[in-house]
Image: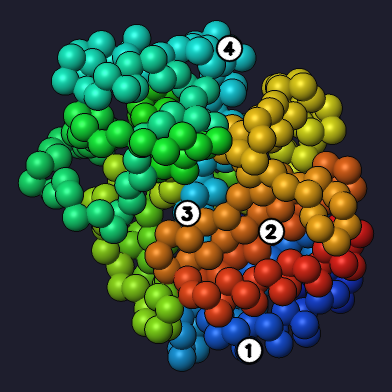
Amino acid sequence: MKKILLFALFMSFTNPFYGQKNSSKAEEIRKQYKIPELAYAVVSSDSILEINVLGFQRYKSSHKAKINDLFRLGSITKTITSYIAATLVKEGKLNWNTKFFDLYPELKPESNPEIYNVTLQDFLTFRAPIPTWSYGNETPNQQEIKGNNQEQRYEFISWFFKQKQIVTEKQEWYGSNPSFVAAGLMLEKATGKSYETLVQELGKKLNINFGFGQPNVSDISQPWGHDENLKPEKPFVNYKLNWLSSAGNINVNLPDFCKFTQMQLQGLLGKSKVLSEEEFNKMHFGFPEFSFGWYSEINEKSGLKYSFHYGNPGTFLTKVYICKNINKAFILFSNVQSEEADKGLMLLLAELQKQYGG
């Protein structure tokens, strides 16, 4: 808490030069595209070039946005899971070619034979040919999956792998949340620790406060998510989101996520003491289109190569775009999920890229 207060104090003294360059444009976009709270940042590997939070924590309320407000990351969680996996591979706890059923042989007899040889690398790069599943699916239900959080994830993936669904159309990659659920279970087995513990340990190393679930569950004064009709999401624990923890359930504030993003940039530039430049490049660009938690593309206007990810967990939208070539990254958070809000965020992203050479 003391660190957050010090950061807020620092922001109050530096606002004229730090975080206000695009404030007017961002506020205009926030209002036009009906975004209750908008947070954005531009960072390099060693500096925060611009950071700002605008608007309100709840639609039609007086709860103003704050710099330490928490946002659900949604699928950006996958980048954190992949980084933890990379560090464990580096430590020799497991390797990219470790098969899921080498660690969980008891689940193999009743599982779909199509996935017998799927590896950690396959899961983290979306190369495992398994169907999609998300919190909107009706089955299984809460009565079918029992135990504590970790046990529920085990029971869920046991149920999922028993399904005889086969992906009939061969694809370059398969965007399935259960791939990262399975990967999370492999990390738990290799370390003897829960996924939550692994995330908290990473947070301690990076001085980041990672949380889980809706921000307003643990603290009602944090931002509330909103659906496309701007209806605020009341505090509640969605048990299915726990099953998907390693795929999309982390929350964090913008200054802390800047630290994680800067760490990725540092690694891509060969400045990490944990993983080599080659290992970071493999993580971001090792496979076409989607690597270890990161999408990649060439920006049509600038011709620059980006690694990126985005989250859309129902009532929040998040985006992070990293460009190694110009040593810049762009982060955008909102506490509403709608097509309109998404257009607004992409418009702001384009504006920031234009100004910062991206």
Sequence order check, earlier mark of 4 and 3: 3
Question: Which residue position holds label 4?
Answer: 91
Question: Which residue position holds label 2?
Answer: 331
Q: Considering the image in quadrants, where does the C terminus appear?
A: bottom right
Identify the element where label 3 is drawn.
Answer: helix
Q: CA distance from mark 3 to mark 1?
A: 24 Å
Question: Which residue position holds label 3?
Answer: 74
The correct choice, above or below, for 24 with respect to 123 in the image is: below
Asked if disc 1 and disc 2 are in contact, CB closer than 8 Å, the reply is no
Q: CA distance from mark 1 to mark 2?
A: 20 Å
Residue kind at label 4, given as amino acid type: Glu
Residue nearest the viewer, comparing 170 with 257: 170
Sequence order check, earlier mark of 1 and 2: 1
Sequence order check, earlier mark of 2 and 4: 4
Query: Would you say residue 286 is visible in this rendering?
Result: yes
Query: Would you say residue 245 is visible in this rendering?
Result: no
At label 3, counting other C-alpha atoms closer than 10 Å, the crowd grade (few under 14, some 14-19, many 20 or more) is many
Q: Residue at x 60, y 65 (%)?
A: 333
Q: Nearer the viewer, mark 4 or mark 3?
A: 3
Residue kind at label 2, given as amino acid type: Ile
Residue kind at label 1, given as amino acid type: Gln
Question: Which residue position holds label 1?
Answer: 32
